[in-house]
């Protein structure tokens, strides 16, 4: 059985520990043994969690260890994943037992697929993507690496999310929209037009908030 280490012991890292217990393969192919985090004593006010066994900067990757990253900021997450990968870290997928992934879809490595997520036919998902509770992904969607989709967002058929995109909770990305690299979609937005790289959009219909 592999020893799973969660990168980051913050709020989502704590949620991820509980999520793991209901994921496919838990207790059979992997089990959480601890966190790595550069923060000093991040769990001091919490009980019921595995220990912080080291820091991210200096952690020595052992042969039987596998990893998942709880860092939600896509830019920071990318840097940390690259650092650990260069030291030989192996990342696994966490797929909640209630998630639905159609067999004609493709899922990269190091992805987190939360409760009640639905991924439709012929979807292509890159490495290190995060899908929180209740996300719906329509058919023929393309999601590039290191993208994050928050709770109950809906990505309609034919959408393309380029790498490092962030889609906040309860947003809807309309059919065939392209969200370019590094763009951010604000919570509860309805996106009907393509979103340019590095911009933040918000509203219904979504409009540029930041460039």
Image (cartoon, helix red, strand yellow):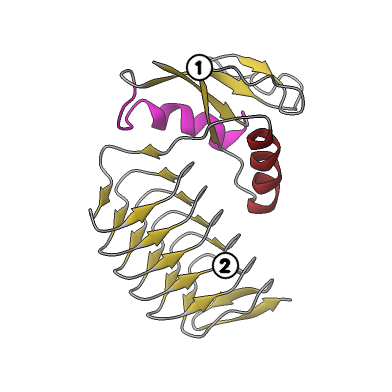
- Residue 51 colored magenta? no
Work out whether residue 46 or residue 80 is closer to the camera in this orientation and state it. 80
Q: Quadrant of residue 209?
A: bottom right
Q: CA distance from mark 1 to mark 2?
A: 39 Å
The residues colored magenta run 9-26
Q: Quadrant of residue 63?
A: top right
In the rendered image, residue 25, in percent from the top left (x then y), is placed at: 31, 27
Q: Which residue is mark 2?
A: 186
In the rendered image, residue 182, in percent from the top left (x then y), is placed at: 65, 65
Q: Which quadrant: the C terminus?
A: bottom right
In the rendered image, residue 27, in percent from the top left (x then y), is placed at: 33, 18
Q: Which residue is mark 1?
A: 64
Q: Which quadrant: the N terminus?
A: top left
Which badge, 1 or 2, is on the more N-terminal residue?
A: 1
Q: In the rendered image of this protein, does residue 198 appear above or below residue 65?
A: below
In this picture, residue 97 sits left or right of residue 201: left
Work out whether residue 102 or residue 86 is closer to the camera in this orientation and state it. 86
Q: In the rendered image of this protein, does residue 185 appear above or below residue 91?
A: below
């Amino acid at each position: 059985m592999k020893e799973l280490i969660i990168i980051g012991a913050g709020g989502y890292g704590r949620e991820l520990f509980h999520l793991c217990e209901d994921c496919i393969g838990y207790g059979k192919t992997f089990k959480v043994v601890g966190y790595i985090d550069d923060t000093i004593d991040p769990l001091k006010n919490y009980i019921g969690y595995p220990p912080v066994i080291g820091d991210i900067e200096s952690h020595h990757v052992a042969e039987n260890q596998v990893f998942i990253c709880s860092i939600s900021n896509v830019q920071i997450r990318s840097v940390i994943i690259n650092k650990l990968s260069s030291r030989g870290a192996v990342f696994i997928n966490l797929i909640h037992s209630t998630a639905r992934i159609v067999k004609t879809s493709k899922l990269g490595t190091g992805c987190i697929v939360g409760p009640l997520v639905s991924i439709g036919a012929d979807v292509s998902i890159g490495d290190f993507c995060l899908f929180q509770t209740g996300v719906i992904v329509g058919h023929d969607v393309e999601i590039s690496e290191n993208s994050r989709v928050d709770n109950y967002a809906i990505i309609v058929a034919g959408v393309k999310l380029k790498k490092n995109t962030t889609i906040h909770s309860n947003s809807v990305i309309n059919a065939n929209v392209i969200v370019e690299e590094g763009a951010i979609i604000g919570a509860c937005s309805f996106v009907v037009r393509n979103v340019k790289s590095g911009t933040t959009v918000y509203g219904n219909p979504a409009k540029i908030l930041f460039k």
